[in-house]
Structure formats: structure tokens, C-alpha cells
Amino acid sequence: MSKDLGKILLAKNDIIIDNWIAAVREHKDIESSKNLTYKSIRDNLPIVLRGLATLLSQPLNNRQQIIEEKGIEHGTIRAEQGYDINEFLLEYGLFRKIIFAVLKPDLVSCSGDEILQTVDTIDSIIDHVIALSLESYIELRLQELQELQSQLILNNQELTRLVAMQKESLSHLAHEFKSPLNSIMGFSSLLLKQQREISSGQDKSLNLQFLEKVIGNSRQLLRLINNTLEMSRIEAGKVPLSLEWINVRSQIQTVVEALEPSARQKNLQVILKCGGAPEQVLSDPLRLQQIITNLVSNAIRYTSEGSITITCEVKNDDKWLIKVADTGVGISPEAQKQIFNSYFRVASVGGYSPDSTGLGLAIVEKLVSLLNGNIELVSELEKGSSFTITFPKIIKLSS
Ligand code: ADP
């Protein structure tokens, strides 16, 4: 008497699924299943199994379709769950093994033909489901690969752009370092030569000008290194702000007191207009001082006669401003476009100003933006320049 193996399979559906999930979880090479819940391992295999049972009883076309749909879904789900192809195939191997293990007691009492037919049907259906699942699994992986590839192309473009930018600034930096270094080396060897001549009695005095050149160039090199480091620290986001309520008027006063001697040396008048300054502002005192110092020292450096006027006032309910204006050489409209770029300097008749690095305003601009501010320049050649910075009364720190 022939048995309805489809019915038996249907009756044993739960036990097959339970045994299969336990086997998948225990299998040492199906790592991806370890973090999945019982339900997400099971997903739609019971439907595949039910379809298989129905097919064993009476092959129906719509059942076949259910198997196809669920098989496709199974591959997609496993790909999304992060299964690799090996885990995926092992899982189906276990499925096949457990079906036969559970059916074995019923199969042994069947005729040889029946056994062969059942094994063949189960095998071909499982192979069919594997093929469908594999197709959808691979399709999803290919889609992912395509997305990754486009992302990689974009990243690569960005990286190439960054490397090119870095190359440019590195070669610029090397160029900037070279001239003070050459000078230091040249004058140092002249000094050593003189020193030897003095020791051997051929010469009597050391040329102090050489010594001054060495010291001057060493200072310039140090300034360059410090400014470059400061710039890269700011760019790397390594300048933490420490905000506190400060009296900006006394902050300006401190800067002016420190710089007044160099203004006096050039007979420049320093005028303070801080009557309308806010009583208290929330800011980083150190960074604010750095900004003001930079602007005022530039104003002194690039002005040969006249005055420097520093204004500080409340602009409106939310903002306050500080303006540093001079009656100096001024900046041409073309130079104004690049004035905040790193290493940009305007050469005057005698060349660059000796202690100029071209990094001061680039640092100022970065610091102003760190403090949520905005900097504007108005300048006219031979008339003077004025830098106005507007700050919000309340600074929002970006996390
Ligand atoms: P540095 O002063 O070290 O060269 P900065 O970035 O501070 O670097 O300035 C860049 C260039 O901008 C200077 O070389 C100078 O030519 C010009 N500059 C800056 N401030 C003024 C100013 N107040 N008046 C005229 N030119 C200025």
C-alpha cells in the first residue's frame, strides 16, 4: 500500500523546521545565523516546505509558483541578513538532510520505486529552490557591489582632489621654508669662517649683520612652522573652543597695549572707539585675542603714516562687531580676492615684508568661522583697509 508522503511531510512540518533551525544555529560555519532570532532564521522556509509537501501529494502548478516566489525571497532575505554564499549553501544542505532524516522511518516501509521517486522529487524541488534563491541572492549582492563601486569612484575622486590639494600646499610650504633655511645656512657658514679667521688672527671682528640675518631668518622659519601647525590644527578640527563671558573692551585694550610700541615707532596713532561695545560677550578669549592681534599688527605693518582705528560696537539685537581700519597701503581688488588664501602675500617695491608668512589672514578667517563670525574687507590702494568682523552674541558650537 503506497503512502501519502506529502501528508506525512505536512504533519512533520514543525519538527523539521525546529530541527533545521537548531542545526543551522549549531553549525560552526554558519556564523551569520548566530545573531538572528528564531523567527528570522525560519523566515519563509515553512512555506517552501508546505509547497513541497503538497507537490509530493499532488503536483499543482500554483504550488510550484509559491515555491518559486518564496525561494526568490529567501535568497534576498539571506543576502540582506549578511549571509555569505557558503553559509547560504550549507543552510540548504542541512534543510535537505533534515527532511530525509525526519521522513526516514516512513520511507523504509515504502517500496524501492516509491523511495526513489520521493527522493528524486524532494531533491529536484530543493535544487530548484536553491537555484532561485541563489539567483536573487547574487542579484542583491551585485546591486550592492554596484552601489559600492559608485561610492568608491566618488571617494576616489575626492581623495585624488585632496591629494592634489595637499601636494600643492606641501610644495608651497617647502618653497616657503627653503628661502629662510638657505639664508640661515649661508650666513652661518660665513659666520663660522669669520670665527675661524678671528681665531687664527687674520680678522678682528665678527660681522654682526650676518648674525642678525641668521637670527632674523630663524625667527621667520619658526613663525612659518608655528603658523603652519596652527593652520593644520584648525583644519583638522583640533582647536577646541573654550567659551566664557568676557569684556571685549578690555580684551581690545590688552592687544593695543602690547602693540602700541611698534605703532609708536612708526609714528602711527592708535584710536579706540569702543563706546558702543557690548558689556559682555560669549566668546573664546584666547582665539578672539589672536584674531584682534593679527588684524591690528597687520594694520601697523602695512601702514607707514596716519592712524589705526579700532571700533567695537553692538550691531543689532543678535550681533556685535569689531572693525580694524588703517590708512595704509591698501589692497588691490585682485589681491582682495585671494587675501584669505594660505601663503598669499602682496609684494611691495622692496619685495615681501620680512616677517610675513601669508598665513595670518588665513588663520584669522578660520578662527572667525569657528566662532560663528563673518569677516569682510573694504580697501582702496594708497588709502587704507578696513577689516570688519561680525560675531553673533550667542555662539553655537558644532559638535
Ligand atoms: P602676512 O601678513 O604674514 O603676510 P597675512 O595673511 O596676514 O600674512 O596677510 C597676507 C597679505 O595681505 C600680506 O602679505 C599683505 O600683503 C596683505 N595685507 C594684510 N593686511 C593688510 C593691511 N591691513 N593692509 C594692506 N595689506 C594687508
Image (tube, helix red, strand yellow):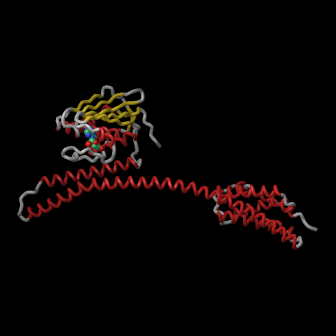
Count of marks placed on residues: 0
Would you say 325 lies left or right of 92 here?
left
Would you say 80 lies left or right of 44 here?
left
Residue 245, given in percent of the width and then of the height, sits at: 38, 34
Seen at 39% across and 46% down, the residue is 239
Would you say 293 lies left or right of 72 here?
left
Is residue 298 in sight in this rendering?
A: no
Between residue 123 and residue 104, name the one nearer to us: 123
Between residue 340 and residue 256, name the one nearer to us: 340
Between residue 49 and residue 145, name the one nearer to us: 145
- Decide: is 282 above or below 139: above
Q: Quadrant of residue 88?
A: bottom right
Q: Residue furthest bottom?
A: 112
Seen at 80% across and 58% down, the residue is 64
- Decide: is 362 above or below 132: above
Residue 285, given in percent of the width and then of the height, sits at: 35, 38
Seen at 22% across and 58% down, the residue is 182
Is residue 40 in sight in this rendering?
A: yes
Between residue 205 and residue 131, name the one nearer to us: 131
Q: Quadrant of ligand 1?
A: top left
Seen at 34% across and 48% down, the residue is 230
Q: Residue furthest right?
A: 1
Residue 375, given in percent of the width and then of the height, sits at: 35, 36
Quarter the N terminus occupies: bottom right
Q: Quadrant of residue 198?
A: bottom left
Would you say 352 lies left or right of 105 here?
left
- Decide: is 349 above or below 25: above
Residue 101, given in percent of the width and then of the height, sits at: 80, 68
